[in-house]
Amino acid sequence: MTDEKLGIDPMAGIDADACTFWGDANADEARWLAAKWELMSASWAGALMGTDTYHQRDADEAGMEERPYLIHKFRQREGLTPNNAMRQGSYMEPVVIDQWSKITGVPMVRSNAMYVSKRFERMSCTIDGFITPDPEFQETPDLGFLEGSRDEDERADQQAWFWPFLDRLYSLGEEHGPGLIEVKWKRVWAGGNKTQAAKYPERFFATGPAAHAETFGCPVQHAWQVMHQMAVTGVKWAVLATIIGGFDPRAWIIEASDIAIGRLGAECAAFWKAFEHGANNDLHPG
């Protein structure tokens, strides 16, 4: 069974026609970081597709367009400087996975495996883990972790999104097998404060079936990252699982889109063509 090999066989649950196993990101961090400059990893997908606010800020400060500045970052190996939020997020990844496994009653397997696409030019991803719902072995969910009112009726209404979410997990697991899980430890407001949330409402972590309908069902700043992971691995579905503000768990299901994956592949190919053959004057301000 695939589920029994998850976490042991790195290609268990992965489409072998879509990608190859590169290695464990934790085994040699220096080698992994170097590889990220030779391949377009999922962490750069938002910048590649023009939805990464941090990259937009950096490009504005440099007086450059976003795509030329992304090429500049790759040529100069200019990654984001690790800050406290990034360190906290990395440290809390296994905690978030464990908490969401308890909430849903669905087993989740931690992974740091990196994969390289066979279908798209120099595309890669490093996954957080797998989610393995099996309709024949359903565990009891623990909604005690979910935010809700003290009033029983209000609490049921606030948590009503969870049951269709859980049903869909089992439906997708039955149809496609394991999905990917991408976890985030987030602040309460998008961008870290209410002003940013008001300015960019599409980036707020709202719930419900209508939320983020234009970005595959999940918040825009992470939508392309998760789609990129599915483009590389060939996995048909994924869950973005978050803990917001340290106490508010929310999650979204993202299903693979051939149209979106095609766009990613095309943009990645255009990036590498410009990176290797583009005019140098594209990389200067002005």
Image: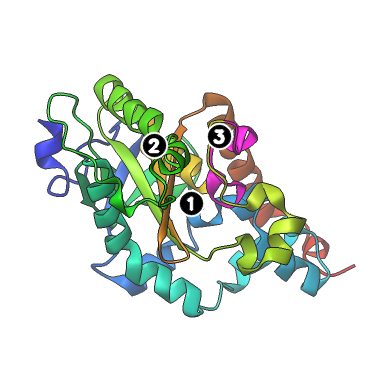
- For the residue marked with disc 3, what is the amino acid? Phe
With 155 as the anchor, is 111 left or right in this view?
left
Q: Residue at x 27, y 62 (%)?
A: 94
Residue at the right extreme, as displayed: 286
Measured Cα–Cα span from mark 2 to mark 3: 18 Å
Q: Residue at x 31, y 22 (%)?
A: 171
Measured Cα–Cα span from mark 3 to mark 1: 16 Å
Tag 2 secondary structure: helix
The quadrant in which residue 185 appears is bottom left
Q: Please tell me how crowded label 2 is: few (under 14), some (14-19), or many (20+) other residues with Cα within 10 Å.
A: many
Instruction: State the residue position of label 3.
Output: 216
Q: Nearer the viewer, residue 259 or 193?
A: 193
Instruction: State the residue position of label 2.
Output: 162
- For the residue marked with disc 1, what is the amino acid? Ala
Measured Cα–Cα span from mark 2 to mark 1: 27 Å
Question: Is label 2 or label 3 in front?
Answer: 2
**Magenta-highlighted residues:** 210-223
Question: Is label 2 or label 1 in front?
Answer: 2
Residue 42 image label:
1
Tag 3 secondary structure: loop
Magenta span includes 213: yes
Residue 217 coordinates in the image, percent (x, y): 54, 36
Residue 262 coordinates in the image, percent (x, y): 57, 30
- For the residue marked with disc 2, what is the amino acid? Phe
The quarter of the image holding the C terminus is: bottom right
Residue 236 image label:
none
Tell which circle, 3 or 1, labels the residue nearer the N-terminal end. Answer: 1
Q: Is residue 50 visible?
A: no
Q: Please tell me how crowded label 1 is: few (under 14), some (14-19), or many (20+) other residues with Cα within 10 Å.
A: many
Tell which circle, 2 or 3, labels the residue nearer the N-terminal end. Answer: 2
The quadrant in which residue 255 appears is top left
Residues at marks 2 and 1 touching, judged by CB atoms closer than 8 Å? no
